[in-house]
Amino acid sequence: MTVNNKMKAIVWDGRNFPEGLTFTDFDKPRLRPGWVMVNTKAAGICGSDLHYLLGYTRSWIPDKNLPAVLGHENAGVVVEVGEGVTSFEPGDRVAIEPLHGCSERGLPPCKMCKIGKYHLCQNGLTHVGIPLVEMLPGGYGEYSIAHESRLFHVPANVSLEDAALLDILAVGVHAVKLVHPGMGDSTVVYGCGIIGLDMIQCLRVEGVKDIIAVAKYDFQADIARKLGATETIVLNKDLDLVKEVMRLTDGWGADQVYECVGGETDALDQSVSMCRMGGKTVMLGVFSGRRPMDLFTMLWKEVDIISSNSYSTAGYEREFQLAMDLLRDGKVTHQELVTHRYAPEQWLDAINMTISKGKNQSIKTMFIRE
Amino acid sequence: MKAVIWNGDAWPNGVTYGDFPTPEPDPGWVLVKTVANGICGSDLHYLQGYTRHLVHDENLPAVMGHEAAGVVAKLGDGVEGLKVGDRVALEPLHACRELGLPPCLMCQTGNYQLCPNLSIVGVPIGRMIPGGYGEYGLYHQTRVFKLPDQVSFEEAALLDTLACTVHAINLARPVPGETAAVIGCGIIGIDTIQCLKAAGLKDILAISKYDWQGEMALRYGATEVIVTQGKLDAVKEVKRLTQGWGVDQVYECVGGNSEVLKEIPGMVRPKGKIVMEGVFSGSSPVDVLTLLLKESPLLPSMCYSYYEGKREFQMALDMVSLGKAEQATMITHRFEITDWREAIQTAIDKNRTHASKAMFVYS
């Protein structure tokens, strides 16, 4: 019997897209005790992948982890289990939680891992498909390995495509577990990319009164409304966003603004302005570093900035599992969100399409393997 | 009455000492003869013109002073529980109900410090009510607190500051065994240290710019002091003192034009809280990426109001009367009101004069 140690993968050598990417043979990851090998069937292309591929965040990746296989939004089928794995067997349909803290990597757990907040691991949080600390090949390749504790069974009524987006839905679950929105609250979701759209669905599950979705494009606003937004605002240069939110909230502003924009924008200042006195701005967007903020207004209104970073556990529950339950129970849908599908061989088209997502009316582009 | 009067122009030209109409108490209000009044840094921001844009011209000329204590001089109709001659502490914050307006959402829910109609005695925003820079100030009866015998007028005049720090502590709720860093050792920083000590914290790291402030922080309960002289890398020091982990809570007590929030997220442990007490003049850079990576909340603390149904001003008064906070020794400079020019200049030059708190004391 010959053992094939190679797989097909979209491989990134560290240079900018498109030169830095090739579709080629790559070493299959080696299974470890306690870990599981998954043949990825659905793999999302995340905006943060593009930031690496376009060089914006290239400096975060150590050279020793290159060449790398990206892709951290994955679901597939178990092909092999490592020594001691008891909860999975070949053929199981699974979603992969990409976050691996120190315990999973065989290190003594740090203070944050000990209390279940492994998303804040102090010994180097690493992800399947994001080679920050270690190169664990992601869904841009045929096979990934993940620690047994990072796999979740996908119920029969949930598609692997929908399950591949749990990494995003879990971010919304984490934000509501952190902030506890509820009945009667008025909220703004600022930004209707996929994070914003899943945030809207999570707020609807929590039963908040108003969900005002602020979108850049009309097509995003249309989906936002379908997923539960009670009002939508599409940005344009003649629109005074803050004024419009005030008009929709009896002049007070929203109880919470979920900021899902990030980047080099002044979205945080705007979010504080859209809050009522004593409200909360929940920061989900990733900003580049130091941003100027109007601290006078923030103090005068006593608006908290609550940072919400990925997900891990809430109480005794895994947030990734809570997200899976929402899909299983039909409380949340991802069917509207996967707008474009490509075979991995079509990587050039797929990534180009995602880069111009506004023009292409794309919410989520996904690689699909038969 | 005699008063120090500000006409809106920048110090020293805009300030004079002269006659001003003695206010009359409406029903429910109390006229108080000022005995002591602290000079607050925010008074200086107005007088020096930094925050002139916040002041409506119809509030001028103004009699400043929101850190006052005194003796009840005259009661408006319907005031109960007070009599002429009572020694009293004075909360300057007045909102819808006190101003005779139907209560807004914030007032209805006990957050009157966030009321859009907020008016602060001695501060020329909202409705101008003359404060402690004059012989007499005017207060709603709900803002007048009878002083226990053991609390002096001078101590009482600083309750506004202490109440601000009580509010900050109530927002962040530190518990025994936690560690905190206090950035800035002006009076807000020192009062924050006292509140943290009263809350039973293990380590209280004070970060000051000058030696004299650092020494003061130690006297009031700081367990470690980092004096930066404007040069030392405070983040590195905090990390060294906490074995690389960071502190559980950081209290920012600087404000103004400083850029401290560029550095502060580096000092806190993952998920640790950052409380912003300083009043910034406007925009300032914040290291939001580190906030996100550590998932640290940034919590501004604006004045004070209620905590779980209790008045925070009363909590501050209780701290002083129970000996949990030392106020008297913070008053470094006392002036007759007629020496207003020297008093205000002393407060402006505090880096030279080492004035933690300069105060008008009426004889």
Image: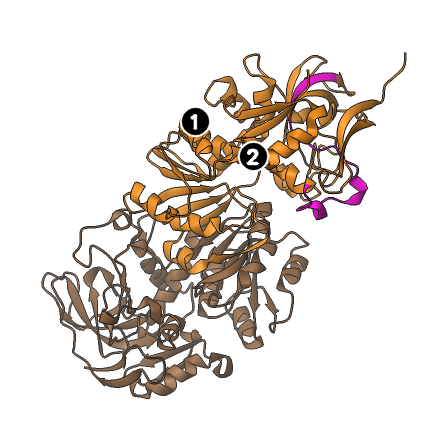
Chain colours: A orange, B brown
Q: Residue B243, relative to residue B55: is it above or below?
A: above
Comparing A366 with A144, the one in front is A366
Magenta segment range?
Answer: A54-79
In the rendering, which numbered label is found on residue A208? none
Residue at the disc numbered 2? A357
- Give the x, y percent position of residue A19: 75, 39
- Give the x, y percent position of residue A26: 81, 28
Question: Callout 1, which amino acid?
Answer: Leu
Could you tell me which residue is drawn at 68 percent across and 59 percent down? Answer: B240
Under tag 2, what secondary structure?
Answer: loop
Q: Is residue B275 left or right of residue A301?
A: right
For the residues labelled 2 and 1, the Cα–Cα distance comes to 20 Å
Label 2 or label 1, whichever lies nearer to me, is 2
Under tag 1, what secondary structure?
Answer: loop
Could you tell me which residue is drawn at 36 percent across and 60 percent down? Answer: B303
Question: Callout 2, which amino acid?
Answer: Lys
Q: Residue A152, relative to residue A260: is it above or below?
A: above
> Magenta stretch containing residue A78, yes or no?
yes
